[in-house]
Image (spheres, helix red, strand yellow):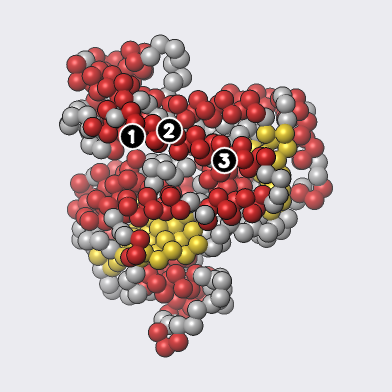
Amino acid sequence: MERPDFGSNRNPIPLALLSQHFGYSDFRPPQDEIIQQVMAGRHAMVVMPTGMGKSLCYQIPALAIPPTSRELVLVLSPLVALMQDQVDSLRRRGIDATLINSSLDREQRLQRYREVSEGQYRLLYVTPERFRKPDFMDVIGEREVSLLAVDEAHCVSQWGHDFRPDYSRLAEIRAALGEPTTIALTATATKECRTDIYRQLNISADEIRLFHEGIARPNLLLNVQEVWDETEKLDAIESILKDSQYQSGGVIIYFSLIKTLERFSDLLLGREVDHVVYHGDLPRQKRRRIQEEFMSGQADMVLATNAFGMGVDKEDIRIVIHAETPGSVESYYQEIGRAGRDGNPSVCVWLYDQNDLMTQMQFIEWANPDAAFYSRVYTLLTDRNEQCRAFGLDWMNDQLQRVSRHDHRLATAIAMLDRVGVIAGPRPPECYQVNAPLPSRFKDDEQLAEKKRRDQQRLYAMVEYAAEAGDRKEFLNRYFLD
């Protein structure tokens, strides 16, 4: 992209702040243009490859706020670990950033509230769930949010690959903040996803400027290797790990199922391949320790589900292997984007076993309950509420279906009912409090089927990617840009 000529309208402050706080002599295109856009009070949608410096696009505007000002740049981020890493990095540079999330105990949280209320900090990171808290709303109401940054913005969209219900409250949050200038940032958003993000933010497409840098990562070698069973997968993993060109850095091997991850961990340990494992069933502190070991280089290789990755800003990841089929091109691209951030050659290999498609098809079923299931959940919550409260979600799951206790449709239904205000919260005991009737959209099988169809299309796109005979990077460009 050609650098714009701002002429006399170019604000020189961002470049001075970049040099002062980060030690760089110039921005990467189009960082400067994005920063000029939001500092002039205009909205921006930024689609930029992982590791290319999206965060600077809101951090520099925060640094430009005068120390005595009540202004604040507010960053919505989906992951506690991601926030902590960014805040730690900024504070090491002497930048007055902070966070408020569930990692703080009550005393720490109240202290942080007092500091924010008194005018400390120009940069504040929170999760969207924090806006459920009246005490937080009182505190943030005492500051002027001059810029709202929505990180991992694909989470806003119901079509995004990492849909998160509280991100759908963005229009309500923006209204409560006085409709501030907004910057939405992501590495992965199709045209359809971007359109939905604008709708969820309540910003029309002609009011928000798109900065799309494509998905160019020339140092990444993208391979798809078809395999027919787990023995072939295991042999392929060993062969990739032995390639001398990629042995100088970290390795991530992604799995869809925890049970498969654990089985492969045992098999690799049997072949004397040292590694650590990371998945959502591990205690939070253990997950944190494993991530720190990988980031510091104490552990070179991690076997992980997609719970691992967001906030992993390690420059020298040389190998990313997908040992099971990803659920979408969006999630696949997000995960391979963690490789080779230092610009050196790195390899990304998907071990494609057609049998793995069944796992992803099951995930799609769980993520898309039909109207009958929503009706049964609502009836159970209203007609047998005392029992729901007494015996919990596992009991509810048993009442709703008896085929498999691992069916996750109830978790989806609870999250969606919370999103639209039918119940008081996503977790016990709030999730048992019914506040409103079941909306018509949850009684309409045609509307519910449309979301399921789109999820299936995204999975089919992975099959098309595997069959691509040409340049797979061109396939990715077509997918995200068309």
Which badge, 1 or 2, comes first in the chain's sequence? 1
58 sits left or right of 438 in the view = right
Are dots 2 and 3 in contact, CB under 8 Å? no
Q: Residues within 10 Å of mark 1 (few under 14, many from 20)?
A: some
Query: What residue appears at the point 44 percent right and 57 percent down from the top-left corner?
Result: 185
Q: Is residue 40 left or right of residue 118?
A: right
- Going by the numbered disc 3, the residue's amino acid type is Ala
Residue drawn at (27%, 28%), measured in percent from left and top?
A: 443
Q: Residue at x 36, y 73 (%)?
A: 39
- SS state under label 3: helix
Percent across and percent down for residue 266 are: 68, 24
User: Where residue 69 sits in the image (x, y, percent)?
Assistant: 27, 72
- Mark 2 vs mark 3, CA separation in Å: 14 Å
Residue 14 lies, with reference to residue 356, above or below; the image says below
Q: Amino acid at mark 1?
A: Gln
Tell me if I can see residue 151 in this picture.
no
Q: Which residue is mark 3?
A: 461
- Which residue of the protein is positioned furthest toward the front in this rendering? 446
Mark sitting on residue 447: 1
- Circle 2 sits in a helix, a strand or a loop, which is it? helix
Residue holding disc 2? 452
